Amino acid sequence: MTNPIYTIIRRLRSPLIVLIVVNAISVLGFVLIPGVDDQGKPWSMTFFHAFYFVSYMGTTIGFGEIPYAFTNAQRYWALVTMYATVVAWLYGIGMLLSVFQDKIFLNQLKKNTFSRKIKNIREPFFIICGYGDTGVQLTRLLSEEGILSIVIDTSEESIHDLQSDDFKVSPIGLCDDASQSEVLEMAGICNPYCEGIISIVNDDTVNLTVAIVTQLLNPKLRLIARAETPEAEANILSFGANEVINPFEIFASRMALAMQSPGLYSIYDWTTGATGEKIKEPPTLLPGIWIICEFGRFGRALYESLENKNVTLRYIEDDRTHSDLPSGSVIGRATEAPSLVKAGIVDAVGIIAGTRNDANNLSIILTATELNPHLFRVVRQNKDKNSHLFNSASYEMLMQRGSIISNTIFAFIRTPMLGDFLRIVSRFNDDKANELVSRIVGVIEDDEAQIWEFKVNAKESPALFKKLKSSHLLVSDILKCHSDVNLGAYCSNKRLSAMPLFMKRNNGNVLLPEDDRDILIDDRVLMCGSKNAYLQMQQILNYEEVLEQVLTGKDMPSSSFGRWFKRINN
Amino acid sequence: MNSEKVIFAFFIVLALTLNYGFYLGDITDPGQHNIYELFAALVVSLISTVLKVGDRTHIGSVFLATSLVADLQLIAAAVVWGITVNVLSEPLTGASLATVVSLAGGALLANVISVILLVAETVSLRR
């Protein structure tokens, strides 16, 4: 890292030399040229007097002719040196100012500050490459949870927005190219506090490059990348243990789920959706003719997921040159009524307006509604800033490209076990899935649902850990509600409104552990429940006296002195 | 003929020679130490310091260090001279002259090291 002082002085070399030489010649001149004192006797300036005079002449302060009035010879010399020294000073100051305004210099300063800040971080953080719609939402989600993020983006405007936005935990921003390994190194990819790197740039090749660099620099680091083409997705998945989010694929497979297995759809949607949402009824997607308004990446992903179910897909595509358009596709603009009619909108059950342009999507929906008021309308929203437009439109299902990615990533970050759970659940048949959904709804009832996980160890659940060393506990034991008067309303059956979904241990994992299952040290448990249940469980896991009260109903003093006192009294 | 190297070497050697010239002579005799030479030595030393700044190599940093030391000593010598003559209004003899000349002697050593480094660098380049 170049010391900025050295950069400044290097640029100032020539002005400094000019200044020194001009000053030296002026001082010498004043010493040599004889003057007179106030009685007319000859008197020479010493170096000291000469230097003093030249100093305040050159800096344009100009006190006057000291200590005696000048002779004309001296004045001639003063005339010459006046212009020379002032110009030399101005040259020097001008160069100094231009150095400070120099973009390269300022960039260097910014990089130095950035790098120093990162080195001093002592808390877990995530690196996010890309600050578009998805990046903004993800940073906000992480910040609300109190997690620090470091954001890299090539656009200065985005970083500027980042710095002027209000966040609970201020993220650190850097305007640079994330695909360069020095930039990633500077951002702390090898820092032990780095919990993961998330690459959500608009360009798949950049995401791929980031994945490769991460694999080379820090192979153990968790990488979550966005890929919008299946090739990029396969590529990134082929090395390391990376997770790839393909928003179109996610949405398309969800739609397939919604048609085929609404129970599973509910589980997926709720666990990876926005936090704090209630678990929803799945939408009823009817079999029949569905009109899809583009055959780009989204359209193709739908084709892969929905083909062969009992739905007929009709595509409307503007671009004739698109190869492998499925048969029955209509060439034309979906925003115009004739194309929609040609595709059979009058008999269709649903329409998916999935183009890359938000205005077109809304126009398609409006036109379609006029032609067939009973359509199930699915619309894709590309840009977050058009949200208020979409809020006023009416549709049955909304696909927000940015939100899907950021919510899914956030869910995976907060609860890493979620991936495993969802993989297992995806193999359920519809009945089993529905049963699970009703169980969850039964437990949580009408409250805000939350998913969390904890590990039974000294760091995350100290009270439980300590208790397990001396006694034996079951799952039902930690789900008991402590009879705190203030929280009485949530203890209807003396049981927390929460249930364990998945338990991971070294010798076998347990799905939906039963009440009489043991809890052992080093278990990792994925729980779902209401927000209050989450808060209460945190208390049970961390505070010994709360755990004791829950287990035995007896009150234990909070301080260690109190406990000791009680012990010796028994 | 590399003009940049010529100028660089010129100023370093000139700084040493002027410095030595000032230092030479009886330490108690003010007639043997010319104030113009001290002035010239100081100016050339400052110029050579500016020329040495910005070199990121190891030898460059040591060059810069020696130059800064020489500057410091010569400035101190000039200040002592100036204060003695102008502020205290004493003639420059005895203790004060000795101070000035010994400070210049210190600067001389720094300049010698600087020139040795220059020679070493030149020899190692072998061209």
Image (cartoon, rainbow, N blue to C red):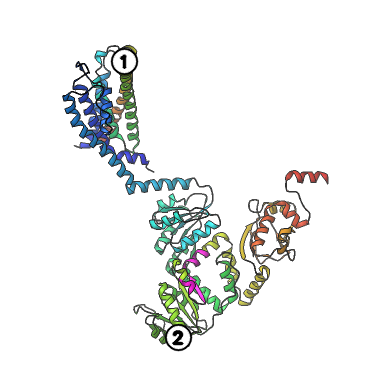
Q: Which mark is residue A371?
A: 2
Near-viewer residue (B31 or A487): A487
Residue A449: x %, y % from top left = 62, 66
- Residue A443 drawn in magenta: no
Can you say which quadrant of the picture contains the N terminus of chain A?
A: top left
SS for dot 1: loop
Q: Residue B77, percent across and down?
A: 32, 21
Q: Nearer the viewer, mark 2 or mark 1?
A: 1
In this image, B77 relative to A386: left or right? left
Label 2 secondary element: helix
Instruction: From this view, report whether residue A99 is shown above or below residue A400.
Output: above
Magenta stretch in the rendered image: A389-407
Residue A390 is covered by the magenta coloring: yes
Q: Residues within 10 Å of mark 2 (few under 14, many from 20)?
A: some
Chain for disc number 2: A
Residue A81 drawn at (x, y percent): 20, 31
Dot label at residue B89: 1
